[in-house]
Every structure is written in structure tokens, then in C-alpha cells.
Image (cartoon, helix red, strand yellow):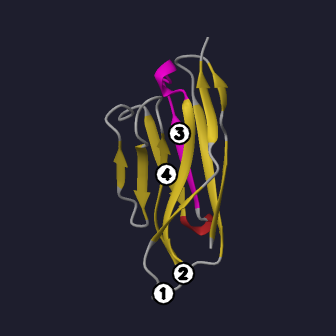
Amino acid sequence: QVQLVESGGGLVQPGGSLTLSCAASGSFFKIYEMGWYRRPPGEPRELVASITSGDVTNYADSVEGRFTISRDGAKNTVYLRMDSLKPEDTDIYYCNAVARRIEWDPKNDYWGQGTQVTVSS
């Protein structure tokens, strides 16, 4: 089982910055990818950014150039640096990990509890 613990959310003014962190722990064979998702009001859950174990990154168009995802493989931790924040970035941000518990298991998705990000003056 993989446990994900997020931190770093909060209230920030438009144009400000925040950095989210997500640490994975527990018993697992390998984490293949970690990322951040959010669910805007009335919309389906959307990928914000992801990073693979090979450091390949992927960003939503709406955050490209403003957000930066990175990871520390030794700590099984992923970070999301959010700059130039806008009110429409307000949401709960959920950490996701794609992992195998043991070598011959299928890959599974694991989710954190979410951390609130509020962008408001």
C-alpha cells in the first residue's frame, strides 16, 4: 500500500507563489509516476502536472509556464512550484502516484487527501 501525504497549500494573493509537496510512504515495489490533479467546479478532475520516474514531465495547458513539477526520487517526494497564481487556480489539489506494490502486481493509482489552494486578494 502507498500512502501519500500532501502539504504546502494555503491562501495566496493573485500573482503570488506556493509550493506543494507530496511524500509517498509504505510498502511498494516502484513508483512510476507522480502528479497533481484538481477538480474545478462543475468540471471533471483534471491533470495539473505529472512527472515520471525518468523525469518526463507533462503539464495542463492552463498552467504551462507558470507551474513546475519536480521530484526527489530518494525521498519519494514530488513538488509543485506554482508561480503567477490566478484566482481560477483555486481548488483542492490531489497528489497521485502510479505504483506497483510488488513486482508482479499491476500498476495502481493511489491518491492523497488533498490540500486546499486559495488564490484571492
**Which corner quadrant of the image does residue 25 belong to?**
bottom right
- Secondary structure beneath dot 3 equals strand
Cα distance in 3D space between marks 2 and 1: 6 Å
Q: Nearer the viewer, mark 4 or mark 2?
A: 2
Q: Callout 3: few (<14), some (14-19), or many (20+) C-alpha neighbours within 10 Å?
A: some
Which residue shows up at 47% across the image and 47% down it?
Answer: 69
Judged left or right of residue 32, residue 29 is right
Work out whether mark 1 precedes mark 3 in sequence or the reverse, and give the earlier one. Answer: 3
Cα distance in 3D space between marks 1 and 3: 32 Å
Work out whether mark 4 precedes mark 2 in sequence or the reverse, and give the earlier one. Answer: 2
Judged left or right of residue 93, residue 45 is left
Report the disc number at residue 29: 2
Cα distance in 3D space between marks 4 and 3: 8 Å
The residue indicated by pointer 4 is 70
Cα distance in 3D space between marks 1 and 4: 25 Å
Q: Nearer the viewer, mark 1 or mark 4?
A: 1
- Secondary structure beneath dot 2 equals loop
Judged left or right of residue 78, residue 46 is left
Q: Are marks 2 and 1 in contact (CB under 8 Å)?
A: yes
Work out whether mark 3 precedes mark 2 in sequence or the reverse, and give the earlier one. Answer: 2
